[in-house]
Image (tube, rainbow, N blue to C red):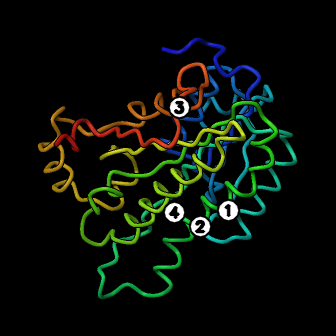
Amino acid sequence: MFQRDLFEGCNVVVTGAGRGIGLEVAELFLKHGATIIVHTGRDQERPVPNLIKTAQADGKAILIPGDFSSSAGTKAFIDAVAGHFKSVDVLVNNAGSMLGRYPAAGLTDEDYRNVVQLNQTSVVEVTRGLLPLLRAANNAAIINTVSISALTGGSPGSAIYSASKAFVSTYSKALARELAPDGIRVNCVSPGTIATDFHKRYSSAEKLEQTRKAIPLQRLGTPQDCAPAYLFLAAPSLSGYITGQILEINGGQLIC
């Protein structure tokens, strides 16, 4: 798919890499030579996959927990990254979740703050905190995970989550302009309906089947469908003239 040593000598940070798309992205970067910081989230009981465990023993993977539900958690994570890396070639801001379905009339101030902090503010905080390390690298790249719901608005109860992903999309475009003089490219990957724990928690089997039937490729996506896009957007040799873009991966859901 990619040359084996495509990211040899590169320092990569992937947030939200404990499972799902983030884990697949982290493993694919490892397979192609990167040294990677794997943000494991706040769940310390989750088993570590063998590839990550082997890379950890070889010094190619560094596992760092971090609770991004507060600014203190993102700061602690940033400080930990700076303790390991003097420069960052690739930052993947993937951490985030819907946290729950909140109908508009029942949304509390606390619900609102929690969703925005995790999906929107933490992206700004981690990016801001790691900018000195990104500027210290040559041809650095930032890839932010957004969502098809940033365009569609999502399904009932996901308004704030969808809006937070739309914020990240627009923020990324603005960053792409601002950071271009520093040689830093900023792009987004926008997954459609992907078969991960996310949808096991927040979508019914009936809803997923209805969605599947409406997808031209007639199947839900997988983390394996998404991960190569991150490597493509991270590699200057493959996407060095691409910045400020959103790569939609949804099996044709948005064909119009």
Numbered badge on residue 125: 1
Q: Is disc 2 in contact with disc 4, using a CB cutoff of under 8 Å?
A: no
In this view, 137 is above or below 94: above
Identified by mark 2, the residue type is Thr
Query: Under tag 1, what secondary structure?
Result: helix
| Residue that appears at 74% across and 33% down | 11
Judging by the rendered image, the residue that carries numbered circle 2 is 121
**Label 4 to label 3: alpha-carbon separation:** 21 Å
In percent of width and height, residue 183 lies at 69, 36
Q: Which label lies toward us, 4 or 3? A: 3
| Residue that appears at 47% across and 87% down | 109
Judging by the rendered image, the residue that carries numbered circle 4 is 119
Identified by mark 4, the residue type is Asn
**Label 1 to label 2: alpha-carbon separation:** 6 Å
In this view, 157 is above or below 181: below
In percent of width and height, residue 213 lies at 12, 43
Q: Is disc 1 in contact with disc 2, using a CB cutoff of under 8 Å?
A: yes
Of marks 4 and 1, which one's residue comes earlier in the chain?
A: 4
Judging by the rendered image, the residue that carries numbered circle 3 is 233
| Residue that appears at 36% across and 57% down | 150
| Residue that appears at 73% across and 49% down | 64
Identified by mark 3, the residue type is Leu
The image quarter in which residue 92 lies: top right
Q: In which quarter of the image is the C terminus?
A: top left
Disc 4: CA contacts within 10 A as few (<14), some (14-19) or many (>=20): many
